Image (tube, rainbow, N blue to C red):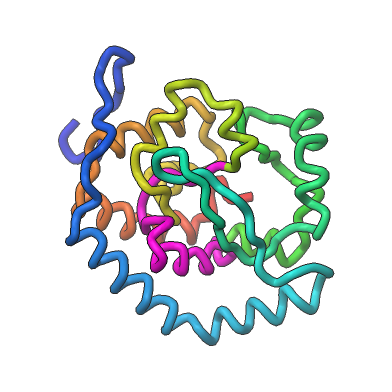
Amino acid sequence: MKGQPFPAVLRAEEPIILARPHGRMRRAIELVVAVTMLVLFVPLLLVIAVVVGTTSQGPVLYRQQRVGIGGRTFEILKFRTMRADADVLAEQLFAARNDGSGPLTKVHDDPRVTAVGRWLRRTSLDELPQLWNVVNGSMALVGPRPSTPVEVARFTPRDHLRHAVRPGITGITQVSGRSDLRWEDAVLLDLEYIEHRSVWLDLRILVRTVPAVLRARGAY
């Protein structure tokens, strides 16, 4: 449809283009943007680090294994938004309160999230350390959000197609409702993005990310 970045429907019989090169231009833009934002946000990063460290027990940064391009794992960085024992309780909570997030270990009103963490999530400020993941090449600015190995173990073969490109800090699902989307709809959007991705599409998604963050729709 004219004016829309993706076709409305992706038919099951349509092939997915799995291995388009990321491109030197895209990588150069990513590095410039990521390094610039890291430098500009140093004061904000320090303030958040102090607030997280002084309001709850545990490390300031949360490090977790995620699955990236080609199914390879990497360590993602975030500001910690949960209790220190959050990972221990994850599967128990998922089994009791899975509310449509498919294979993802994510629920509404998660009791593990701290008061500061809830605000960081709504503003997406907890994701800022992932700019370093962009610099080191494990993530892109734009792409499907990465899942944990435990979550990926519950994927269908179609879900694994999301690993055809590097995961992103933001993506089409982040500007289309984030966690309010059903898992099946989020996968569909990610596959549409992979099929049609380009530098200009990435720039459009980055621009749309700002109002999406301000609206905080689907952020929890």
The residue at the point 46 percent across, 63 percent down is: 133
Where is 126 relative to 98, above or below?
below
Q: Which residues are the magenta region?
A: 124-147
Which quadrant of the structure image shows residue 151? top right
Is 139 or 201 nearer to us in this picture?
A: 139
Which quadrant of the structure image shows residue 36? bottom left
The residue at the point 24 percent across, 50 percent down is: 22
Where is 190 relative to 21, above or below?
above
Horizontal relation, residue 189 to residue 104: left or right: left
Looking at the picture, how far across and down is residue 218, in whole percent?
Answer: 56, 45
The residue at the point 56 percent across, 33 percent down is: 152
Q: Residue furthest front?
A: 72
Where is 160 relative to 43, above or below?
above
In the image, residue 91 lies in the stretch drawn in magenta:
no
Looking at the picture, how far across and down is residue 10, in whole percent?
Answer: 30, 22
Looking at the picture, how far across and down is residue 116, in whole percent?
Answer: 72, 67
